[in-house]
Structure formats: structure tokens, C-alpha cells
């Protein structure tokens, strides 16, 4: 999850706040979603995606600074119960190279056997690399890694082993966006594997109601630079069952802060009011990027559902987004963005795989103060960040915990102390 460095086509018009608040007109993708019954055996991707009773989240259960230390199934079950309590019903995982995803599926299976009312589904990620990715050799972005074939085979095997849990396979994670310089591939590679999986569905080797997608940056889906507007992408949009789109306004508070800084007319507002105005603009920025993908898709004469495959807001950083940077990272801003994205996507019958459930210290292990380590709504030791304080007060997590510790609020629940960490963005000049 890196940041788009290319210029973003985003028209910052007068009255952006009011624009943000109006209803997004892209609801033709899913005009009405019927609420499904609790018959978990018959649920499908079409039943749960875009259904506000089935909130989604990105999940990695790693608690150490290295992924060589895989979380145990007991720990994964601990996390699953916490996420279930907060209303999450769909998880997104990222690869099947390591044991994590298969263990998550097994943990869900065990919880379902222990409690018939436990319900959780998975968008299973299959990681895709170019040739020489993550090696000392120069990445060859025009050829794919030979490891991709085995990754797809593992994803197929897990889907067939847990057909009542895996409802989506996502081919690649930010695997087409060109700033992913270590591993990105051309769209034809993703298209090849999407077509392969769709063929397996037709043959009966995979469930017919399984949905296939790729999860990538909005620009990779045609919503940004024209360099991505190639035939293979157009064919990919035709081939997938829906578009899983990533949008990260937080990163662009540094790289493309056209929406971020405080307007001169807002300087007389209170601290909270100025921050709220900035986060409304961030919401508008995310909507704009999503709409740009929809516009490109429609320009091809294609009409597919769009869901937010990834978006998030880190709660801490001493880097680009910290107090000496764009001043974007704190728990208050994270909570505002989380609420905005949930409200918007619920209203539009879109799923939002918010990034992410728990902090993962391996993300930037060499830089403990880096933002990548702090995207979770929970800390590593299970403290609920400000976005979830109300749920703690409501007793949602009573009897649950992580690492032997009960779920409590960060800052010991002291909102004044929390607000002391909040910095107002710089004033737009």
C-alpha cells in the first residue's frame, strides 16, 4: 500500500463541502440490495457485497515485527470474535503464500462449528508479482513471476475447501499501479488469471456464484493518468465481476494536497471545526477518485459494481503525515474518515474494506514511527482507537480481548488527552 505519486485528475470546485454532502449518482451499480436471511449456506458475493448489514474490513493478524511469526489459530479466533462483535462480516486477505489466509479460513470454520450464529466471509487475495520481484535482480514488469501460477492454484484449492466462506477471489493487490516499482505487472497478466478463474467457474471447478476481481489503485482502473488506458485494462474491466478500487486521501495530504489545507475563511473556526472541514474535503476527494473510475468504465459502455477494496487513515506518524508533515495522522482524524467512508458507502450500496482492523508492526518494522504501522482501528495490544470508543462504552466487546488483555479505550478514554495530539492542517496560501 504505497501512495500514488502521479498527478491526480481532481477538480477542486467552489463549494466542495456541499458537493461532498450531495448523493453520489453512481448508485446505478446496485440500485437496491435486498437484505439476505441468515442462511449462511446460500449466501453469495452478490448477497453480501454492497449490503450494509455486512460491513467489510481488511485484516492481517500479525502481532510481531516479522511475518515469519505467524499468528496461531487461537489468536486469529480471538481477532475474529472482536471483529464480529463490531459488525464486520467480510474480511479481505492479501496472499496465500503464507499460512495466514488458510489459518484465517480454518479459524472461521471452527467458530462457525462452535456457534451457528457466527457469520464471516472472505475476499481471498492472490498475490501477483512481476519477474524478479523482491530480488536483487531488476524487476521485469513485462513478464510475470513463475510463482503466480502456484499462488492461483492455492487460492483455487482454498476456495474449494471453504466454499461457504470464500466468496471473492481478488487477483493481485495494487499489482498494476506503476508506483509499485518492486513488483507491478501489466494489466494483461491480471486479465490472464481473471479469465482463468472465470473459466474454472464455467467448468464447475469453482463455485458459479464466486466473484472474481482485482484490487487496485483508482488510477489502475482508469480513473487517473491516461497511461493506464490500454486495451488489456478495458478487457479486464469486462472480465471481472466487480471493480475493487483503492483510494487514499491520507497519502495525498502529502503528495497532492489540493484538498487538504485549511481555507483562509476557516481560520476563525474552532480546532475541531477546522479538522472536520478538512476531513469532509478528504471524503470528497475519495468520492471524486471513485467517480473517475466509474466515468472511465461507463465510457467503455460497461456497467459493473464498484466497491472500495481499500481505504484507510493512519492514527500516528512522525513522517510525511505527522506533526512536522501534513499533520494528517491522529485518532480523531482517523475516526472522522472512518465514519465518513462508512456513511457514504452504506448510502451508495457499496462495500468498503476499510484498512485495517488491527495495527501491524511488521509493515514498517525498520521505522517504528512510520504511518504504515498504525492503520488499525485497534492497537496491537487490543486497545480500541477513538473511532470505536462508542462501541466500547456500549459493551460491544465485553468478555473479549487480545493478547490476554480486555478491549479498552486508547488514552484511557480521556478525549482531552486524545485531542492534544490533534494538529490542524496548515492554512492554504
Image: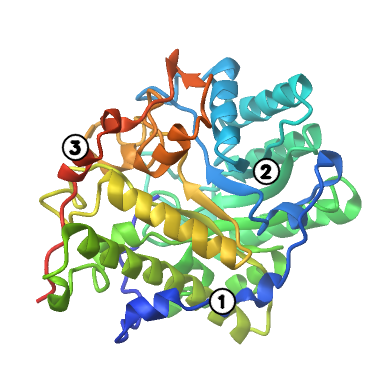
Image point (13%, 73%), residue name: 428
Marks 1 and 3 close (CB-CB < 8 Å) = no
Q: Position of residue 356 (x, y in %)?
A: 45, 42
Q: Nearer the viewer, residue 138 or 420?
A: 420
User: Which of pointers 3 and 2 indicates the residue nearer the eye?
Assistant: 3
Circle 2 — which element? helix
How packed mark 3 is, by other alpha carbons closer than 10 Å (few <14, some 14-19, many 20 or more), is: few
Q: Is residue 313 in view from this perspective?
A: no
Residue 376, image x and y in percent? 40, 39
Q: Nearer the viewer, mark 1 or mark 2?
A: 1
Q: Earlier in the sequence, mark 1 or mark 3?
A: 1
Residue for badge 1: 294
Residue in the picture at 72% in, 21% down: 110
Mark 1 Cα-neighbour bin, 10 Å: few <14, some 14–19, many ≥20: many
Q: How many marks?
A: 3
Tag 2 or tag 1, which sits nearer the N-term?
A: 2
Quarter holding residue 3: bottom left
Label drawn at residue 417: 3
Helix, strand or loop for disc 1: helix
Q: CA distance from mark 3 to mark 2?
A: 48 Å
Q: Which residue is mark 2?
A: 152
Amino acid at each position: 500500500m504505497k501512495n500514488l505519486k502521479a498527478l491526480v485528475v481532481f477538480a477542486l470546485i467552489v463549494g466542495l463541502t456541499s458537493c461532498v454532502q450531495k448523493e453520489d449518482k453512481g448508485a446505478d451499480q446496485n440500485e437496491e440490495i435486498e437484505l439476505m436471511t441468515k442462511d449462511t449456506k446460500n449466501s453469495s458475493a452478490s448477497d453480501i457485497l454492497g449490503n450494509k448489514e455486512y460491513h467489510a474490513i481488511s485484516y492481517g493478524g500479525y502481532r510481531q515485527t516479522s511475518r515469519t511469526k505467524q499468528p496461531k489459530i487461537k489468536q486469529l479466533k480471538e481477532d475474529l470474535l472482536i471483529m464480529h462483535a463490531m459488525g464486520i462480516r467480510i474480511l479481505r486477505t492479501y496472499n496465500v503464500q503464507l499460512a495466514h489466509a488458510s489459518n484465517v479460513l480454518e479459524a472461521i470454520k471452527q467458530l462457525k462449528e462452535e456457534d451457528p450464529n457466527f457469520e464471516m466471509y472472505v475476499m481471498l487475495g492472490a498475490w501477483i508479482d512481476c519477474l524478479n520481484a523482491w530480488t536483487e535482480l531488476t524487476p521485469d514488469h513485462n513478464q510475470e513471476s513463475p510463482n503466480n501460477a502456484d499462488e492461483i492454484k492455492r487460492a483455487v484449492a482454498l476456495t474449494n475447501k471453504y466454499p461457504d466462506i470464500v466468496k471473492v477471489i481478488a487477483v493481485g493487490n495494487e499489482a498494476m499501479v506503476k508506483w509499485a516499482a518492486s513488483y507491478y505487472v501489466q494489466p494483461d497478466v491480471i486479465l490472464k488469471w481473471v479469465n482463468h478463474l472465470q473459466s474454472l467457474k464455467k467448468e464447475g471447478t469453482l463455485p458459479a456464484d464466486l466473484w472474481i476481481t482485482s484490487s487496485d489503485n483508482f488510477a489502475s482502473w482508469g480513473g487517473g493518468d491516461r497511461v493506464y488506458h490500454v486495451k488489456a485494462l478495458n478487457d479486464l474491466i469486462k472480465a471481472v465481476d466487480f471493480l475493487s478500487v483503492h483510494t487514499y486521501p491520507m497519502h495525498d495530504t502529502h503528495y497532492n494536497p489540493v484538498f487538504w489545507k485549511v481555507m483562509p475563511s476557516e481560520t476563525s473556526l474552532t480546532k475541531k471545526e477546522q479538522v472536520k472541514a478538512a476531513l469532509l474535503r478528504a471524503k470528497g476527494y475519495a468520492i471524486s477518485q471513485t467517480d473517475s473510475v466509474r466515468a472511465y468504465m461507463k465510457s467503455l459502455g460497461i456497467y459493473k459494481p464498484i466497491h472500495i477494496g481499500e481505504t484507510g487513515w493512519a492514527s500516528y506518524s512522525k513522517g510525511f503525515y505527522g506533526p512536522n508533515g501534513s499533520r494528517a495522522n491522529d485518532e480523531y482524524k482517523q475516526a472522522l474518515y472512518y465514519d465518513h467512508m462508512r456513511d457514504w458507502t452504506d448510502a451508495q450500496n457499496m462495500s468498503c474494506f476499510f484498512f485495517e482492523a488491527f495495527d501491524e508492526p511488521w509493515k514498517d518494522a525498520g521505522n517504528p514511527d512510520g504511518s504504515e504501522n498504525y492503520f488499525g482501528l485497534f492497537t496491537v495490544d487490543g486497545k480500541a482507537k477513538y473511532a470505536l470508543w462508542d462501541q466500547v462504552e456500549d459493551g460491544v466487546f465485553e468478555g473479549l480481548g487480545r493478547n490476554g488483555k480486555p478491549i479498552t479505550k486508547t488514552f484511557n478514554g480521556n478525549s482531552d488527552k486524545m485531542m492534544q495530539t490533534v494538529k490542524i492542517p496548515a492554512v492554504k496560501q
